[in-house]
Image (cartoon, helix red, strand yellow):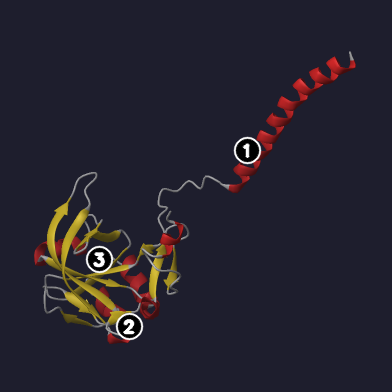
Amino acid sequence: KYLTFMWVLFIVLVPCYHKSEQKTIKKEADTMRKDIKTTEGIFPMPVLMVATYNEDGSVNVMNAAWGTMLERDHVILNLTETHKTVKNIKARKAFTVSIADAAHLTEADYFGVVSGNNTPDKFANSGLTAIKSEHVDAPVIQEFPLCMECEFIEYQGGEYGCGVIGKVVNTTADEKVMNGGKVDISKVDAIAFDPYTHGYYKVTERVGEAFKDGLSLKK
């Protein structure tokens, strides 16, 4: 009878223990990850300075985070047609894309909070300088260290349209960010946009080697 009682007790208690343990694990897991109710979760996002010419030849610049390389020599900018920049791109068939740096964070942010539709002289207000690209009908902002000069290819509208697509025909770099004939990103002192808290962060430290470090796990 004693053995029978112990066996029944074992059958009853073991499942209860497992259920309790599972609840504990689930509770711990629940405390480790939280729903944060955001859909803009990619970080870092770039801080791109998109420069164009207005109808009167003055310079217009906007701050764009929604942009990336479409392929090796094409860029894509998810911009609505209401932007002055898009109107200029369509008219001039060209634009430049510069990488914003920490030294000019204030100016870069200014280009994002002031619209060219309402403030046509906003570039002059920034105090920055520009020269005309030798390759496309668009300005190159001299203070930003890296600049891609682009020909306008097409605008994709609609609910899932990608916006502006351009072909990169030339890229220039300030000699101060070069090392041995190559761009040294640590010298660019580029900034990235944080969509979680709407902050800017510096992108400077090299932490690994692409297409190489992962090979250590290859079997």
Mark 1: give few (<14), some (14-19) or many (20+) Cα within 10 Å.
Answer: few
Q: Position of residue 80 (x, y in %)?
A: 23, 54
Q: Quadrant of residue 13?
A: top right
Disc on the earlier residue, 3 or 1 = 1
Instruction: Name which residue lies at 51% across and 48% down.
Output: 36
Q: Is residue 81 visible?
A: no
Q: Residues within 10 Å of mark 3 (few under 14, many from 20)?
A: few
List x then y, in percent, for residue 174.
27, 83
> Of the residues shown, which amino acid type is indicated by label 3?
Asn
> Foreground: 81 or 101?
101
Residue 167 placement, left or right of 105: left
Residue placed under numbered mark 3 in the picture: 118
Identify the residue position indicated by label 1 in the image: 26
Residue 52 in the image: x percent, y percent?
Answer: 18, 70
Classify 45 as above or below 1.
below
Q: Is residue 21 above or below residue 164?
A: above
- In this rendering, position of residue 62 left or right of residue 40: left
Front position in the image: 143 or 128 = 143
Q: Earlier in the sequence, mark 2 or mark 1?
A: 1
Say which quarter of the image contains residue 24.
top right
Numbered disc total: 3
Q: Amino acid at mark 1?
A: Lys
Circles 3 and 2: CB atoms closer than 8 Å = no
Which dot marks residue 177? 2
Amino acid marked by disc 2: Val
Q: Secondary structure at mark 2?
A: helix
Q: Residue at x 13, y 67 (%)?
A: 94
Distance from the alpha carbon under mark 3 to that under mark 1: 53 Å
In this picture, is 2 found above or below 218? above
Mark 2–mark 1 distance (CA, rounded to whole Å):
50 Å
